[in-house]
Amino acid sequence: MPQTSSVSPLVGREDELARLTGVLERARAGEARAVLIAGDAGVGKTRTLDEVAGRAAAAGTTVLTGHCVDLGDVGLPYLPFTEILGVLAADERFAAVLAAHPVADRLLGAGPQDAEGRDGTTRSRLRLFEDVAALLAELSDVAPLLLVLEDLHWADQSSRDLLRFLLSRGVLQRPAGGARGHRVALFASYRADDLHRRHPLRPLLAELVRLPSVERLELRPLPDGDVARLVRSLRERPLPEATVHRIVERAEGNAFYAEELVAATDAPVHGVPSGLADVLLIRFEQLSETAQQVLRTAAVAGRRVGHELLRDAVGLPEEELESALREALGRQLLVSDDGDTYSFRHALAREAVYADLLPGERARLHGAFARLLGGPDRRSNSAAERAHHHRESHDLPQALAASLEAADHAQRIGAPAEELRHLEAALDLWSAVDAAARPAGPDAVTLTLRASAAAAHAGDLHRAVSLTRSALAGLGQDADLELAARVRYTLAGNLLRVDNLSAAFAHSSEAFALIPAEPPSATWVWAAATHVMAARQVGEIETALRVGRRALRVAEELGVADARADLLISVIGLEDDNRTTERGRRRLREARELARRAGNAPVELRALFNLAIGCFESGAPADCLDLAAEGLERARRSGLLSSPYAREMRYLRLLVRYTLGHWEECLREAAEDEAGGPPAAGAHTVAPVLYVALARGDLGAADRARALLDGPFDWMVTLVAGIVLTDAAALRGDPEDAVRWARSTVARLTDDAGTPPAVTVRLAALALSAVADTVVGLRAAGDEAEAGRWTQAAAELLEQARRSARRGEDDRPQGPEGQAWLARAEAEWERLATGPDPAAWQRAVDGFAHGDVYERARCRLRLAEALLAAGRPQEAAREAGLAHREADRLGAAPLRERLDDLVRRARPADTGDRATQLTAREQEVLRLLARGRSNRQIGEELFITAKTASVHVSNILAKLEAASRTEAVAVAYRQGLIAPETAGPGRPADREPLPRGGR
């Protein structure tokens, strides 16, 4: 099998690399060691060895690699060692040592034909082994050695014997008397899945691992999170998340398989890529015909099959079956599981064998399994298997009945994604099965409605909308009014979840009008509950309040507890309370208890989410963690971890970690969510990761945020991308980009009633910071006209921030977080309008005291700058010190750099002139000016626009009191701001761009 390409990125393997690096360090200190590295083909042995070899070479170790090759029964003696000696012979450092040891000439000069055979005696062979050991020992006196032997499972007998000698009696033996040992490490890799019971390497490995200086390291399959990172890194353009998760699932931790599956993503056909299938079938084709037939039958059964079921399906006598199974197990194509079952060692191997079946053979075997599983002693959960086998054997009525049975089972055990899959299979079969042959029960519309609910619970919201639209289209003219209303209010609820608010309100209005209020009915209550929610979202507050109050009374009269709970949540905030008040929280707890008693987990999750986010909005972010954890545990027990409110609580939990400054914990939990969480998590998981990355100076976070926008509109994706892209533009000093992203994000998130999102105040404040920097620079350069244009833009942003903070959810002022962002926006406005105001920045610092430690530290920087400008250096130093400690703890490098720059500017005695006023970004621009760069070239190297570069150049000329770019460079030389050697064409610095990091 081809090895994993060494040009692919290495992901994961941190523990394995640390262990191998530790062995190398001990070997360099004179403690010779060997590691036998086992792993399945393609799991990443070569890539891991390449990485550790690169590290060894960088540390001064000589790395010598020898490869064993599969040459069947005519293997070449000592092949990996002759390769190693050939490399040594070309290295002049070792010429003298090689000349003193004729063993090199003996193996190299004669070629590998049979160095042992010419002497023909055991003593001659022993001298050969001793000479090789002595040679390696002396070579290690010249430089530490790392010997790498790859694919040891293909080693010839002579090479295995020489390896045994070297590890047991040769270079790994510690000299007597406590002297330092040889500076040699030996890493040998082999394929664990190739070692059948009679493989000649098996007894050698058993012998070697008992030696004190030899250890074994098994490279296990990569965790799913690492495979996902590998898959994403293999493509310049991001793959859809569904594709990534499918590849991760199929690759099962094998890096080579993952790479092959990624390479085949553009292919029009599905299944196993042809090149990979050829590799996977090699071992299968080496089996006897009987064993191949057993494997073909097992492949039709699926990944795992019981012994009795396989025996009945294949139709072989027990003795022949056992012999065939023993052969397949020995070749490690099958593995034996607990409970007398067998499974394919890798799912892709099963796919390849299955694809190799003839169509008729495949259908016949599927039919046999369907009949066997339908017997009187079948397992209670075999409906899904029977549905699959009936469908593949073209027995469609039975497939439909089994699919519905499987959907019922999935619903009972809380598996909505599986329920959806079985329901969609049933819907696909529905029209192909005669009405008389269909099982008794729901009609197609009701079935489609149920499928939409399963899709919503599984987090596939757009699929839920599509299915409900199908149900609506399937309603006939004489459809039952209750069913027609259910379809419409279900569609309205699903449309609310994908932020199609006006359409949701239209459908909820239709549903509410279809069902008469008298006599009271549960259907009317649920239609009303959905209508209240939709009316509230589009700003029809009076309608929401009127309908909600009436529906609450009816729900209580009828005893529809879960609908009453849903209504309680919806009307909170429409009267004198909201989820941040004690009365509001009391009503939410009442709603949660009603939903819990009714067994309605989705409504209970809605109550828990509102309780949790109410804590966050009221300025107590730490208090919401317990509620979010409780909600996620409830979602887990109900099989609703992918549902909308569970996703929101997962995001809220990560956001709290980020806000409180627990960034490492935030990143760890996000990685766990990505590895083990539902595919639908999307921006909810990645958002805090992007916030941390940007704050730590990774401007690539902006590229990843922009990539999130590829695809259909998603409210959360748009929010996250807008925050990251606006802040990234502000950090790199690009006001045009910052304002553009802030405005476009607000426009996309503004609802159908024209209400901008609550995040408007944050986006406006971030954009204002970039605009304020620009205006200050333009005024310093004397460009009042351009400063005036940007001041007008700043005034518009400030007004947006004020309106947003005054009118949050339910037309009430925003909570502490929104007010803190408004305080920052006001302080930025003061900075550009009248100069930095310590009092304004103190209000911003105090505003973020509710828990956002990073934003508080950023405001402390501005406060320190304002204090310094006001002639209060000691207070400025105190605030800068507090911010610096926080930046160090968080690893927020750009903030730390700006604080360092502030400290430098606070020491005018260092140069005694205005040069100390240059910012870190201006110093970067100055260095490029000294190299003769144009504004366009400066922009390209610093990832800013040419116009922004021009503003920085103008600032530099003003601060250095220079009339031209040339004069500014001359002043910089005189004052020691740049060294002469950094300038001039042809020097290395002239060809190498500055790092992308920083602000």
Image: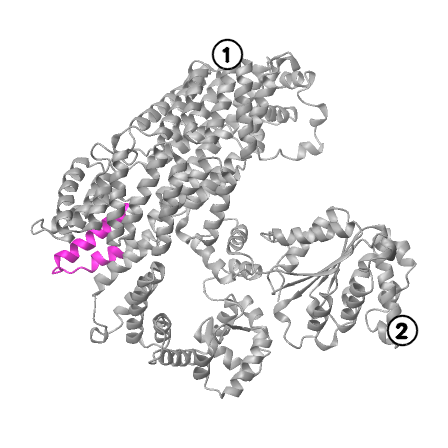
Q: Quadrant of residue 826?
A: top left
Pointer 2: what residue?
A: 123
- Relative depth, front residue between 640 and 190: 640
Is 489 part of what is drawn in magenta?
Answer: yes
Magenta region's main secondary structure? helix
**Which quarter of the image is occupied by the C terminus?**
top right
Count the numbered circles shown.
2
Pointer 1: what residue?
A: 870
Examine the rendering and report whether any part of residue 310 can be seen: yes
Q: Position of residue 22 (x, y in %)?
A: 70, 51
Is 888 part of what is drawn in magenta?
Answer: no
At numbered mark 1, what does the secondary structure look like: helix, strand or loop? loop
- Relative depth, front residue between 940 and 518: 518
Q: Is residue 626 left or right of residue 920?
A: left
Residue at point 45% right, 40% down?
A: 688
User: In this rendering, is residue 161 above or below 999?
Assistant: below
Q: Amino acid at mark 2?
A: Arg
**Which quarter of the image is occupied by the N terminus?**
bottom right
Q: Amino acid at mark 1?
A: Ala
Q: Position of residue 527 (x, y in %)?
A: 17, 49
At numbered mark 2, what does the secondary structure look like: helix, strand or loop? helix
3D distance between C-alphas at marks 2 and 1: 91 Å
Q: Which residues are magenta?
A: 467-496
Instruction: Please rate how many residues cluster around mark 2, counting C-alpha atoms within 10 Å: few if below 14, some from 14 to 19, many from 20.
Output: few
